[in-house]
Image (spheres, rainbow, N blue to C red):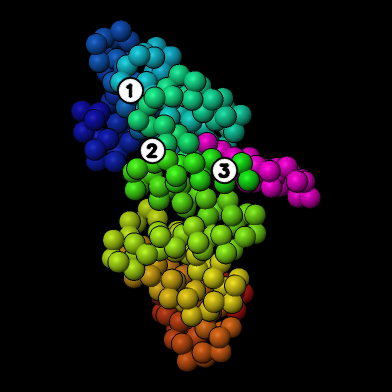
């Protein structure tokens, strides 16, 4: 019953049903499976501290099971999303030590790069003039480049590519951002782009603007608008507006502003971008 709720994306109901089944007997043959799915459901509903605790318990109690590396990988993800970077680093180190041969190794390395990015962001927020943040971003670049060079799985490489571009953006290297993202952007031009990577289109467009490549920036923003992802449509339109404003194409600028108004977008955002 709990897994049925999980398949329906009703994670709160899934946690309740799975926990009830687990509480009836913590040592039952299905205990590991139940606890793993409780932790995964907690992660999916953004209960990061609870997810981390449950998933670490799975790895602790059944370290040789098929789910142990998955559990530790997801526990690292939960710690990172929850902002507990110390725990994320410890869990990542443990994964590398205990499951070096795991099929999740490259995905875990992407996580390691994200941890370095988050640590750099934290340092920069606390001490803006510190060189330590840049060192973290450079460490992220090194880790994520390893994934690009070593993984044979396209989705894993795309995940690494997106995070690598974010690291280069923090290092204020727009050309490297664009070169990193170009293969990902090309998949959208070919009609094969995946929804989880649409943020890469906006990131490329932003950095094309920084290099005064206004036509290219507008075209890449249009790829986002054509992707079917509407969650950041106002941002894409704002980027287009900035591109057309800078290039002096006032006819297209007015058309974009009309689209923002008609879609109840944030016109102020577009004005600021211009």
Q: How far apart, in angstroms, are the residues tagged by discs 2 and 3?
A: 29 Å
Residue under the point 35% across and 43% down: 152
Per the rendered image, the range of residues in magenta is 112-137
Q: Is residue 132 left or right of residue 55?
A: right
- Identify the image quadrant of the C terminus: bottom right
Q: Residue 165: where, in percent of width, then height?
A: 53, 55
Task: For marks 2 and 1, give the one nearer the viewer.
Answer: 1
Q: Residue 48: where, in percent of width, then height?
A: 48, 33
- The dot on residue 142 is 3
Going from the N terminus, do you reach mark 2 or mark 1 first? 2
10 Å neighbourhood of mark 3: few (<14), some, or many (≥20)?
some
Residue under the point 39% across and 18% down: 58
Q: Find out whether the residues at labels 3 and 1 contact each other: C-beta distance under 8 Å.
A: no
Q: Quadrant of residue 21?
A: top left
Q: Residue 22: where, in percent of width, then height?
A: 30, 16
Q: Residue furthest right?
A: 129
| Residue carrying label 2 | 44
């Amino acid at each position: 019953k709990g897994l049925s709720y999980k398949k329906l994306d009703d994670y709160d109901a899934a946690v309740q049903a799975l926990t009830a089944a687990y509480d009836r007997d913590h040592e039952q043959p299905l205990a590991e499976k139940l606890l793993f799915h409780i932790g995964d459901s907690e992660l999916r509903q953004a209960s990061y501290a609870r997810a981390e605790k449950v998933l670490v318990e799975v790895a602790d109690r059944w370290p040789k099971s098929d789910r142990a590396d998955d559990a530790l990988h997801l526990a690292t993800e939960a710690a990172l999303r929850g902002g507990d970077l110390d725990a994320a680093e410890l869990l990542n180190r443990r994964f590398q030590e205990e499951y070096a041969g795991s099929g999740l190794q490259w995905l875990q390395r992407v996580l390691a790069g994200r941890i370095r990015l988050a640590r750099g962001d934290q340092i920069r927020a606390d001490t803006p003039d510190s060189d330590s943040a840049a060192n973290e971003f450079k460490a992220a670049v090194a880790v994520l480049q390893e994934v690009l060079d070593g993984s044979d799985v396209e989705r894993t490489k795309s995940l690494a590519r997106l995070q690598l571009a974010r690291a280069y953006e923090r290092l204020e290297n727009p050309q490297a951002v664009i070169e990193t993202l170009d293969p990902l952007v090309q998949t959208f031009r070919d009609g094969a782009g995946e929804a989880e990577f649409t943020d890469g289109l906006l990131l490329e467009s932003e950095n094309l603007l920084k290099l005064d490549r206004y036509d290219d920036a507008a075209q890449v923003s249009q790829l986002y608008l054509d992707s079917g992802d509407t969650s950041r449509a106002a941002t894409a339109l704002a980027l287009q507006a900035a591109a057309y404003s800078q290039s002096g194409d006032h006819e297209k600028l007015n058309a974009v502003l009309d689209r923002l108004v008609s879609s109840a977008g944030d016109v102020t955002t577009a004005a600021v971008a211009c």
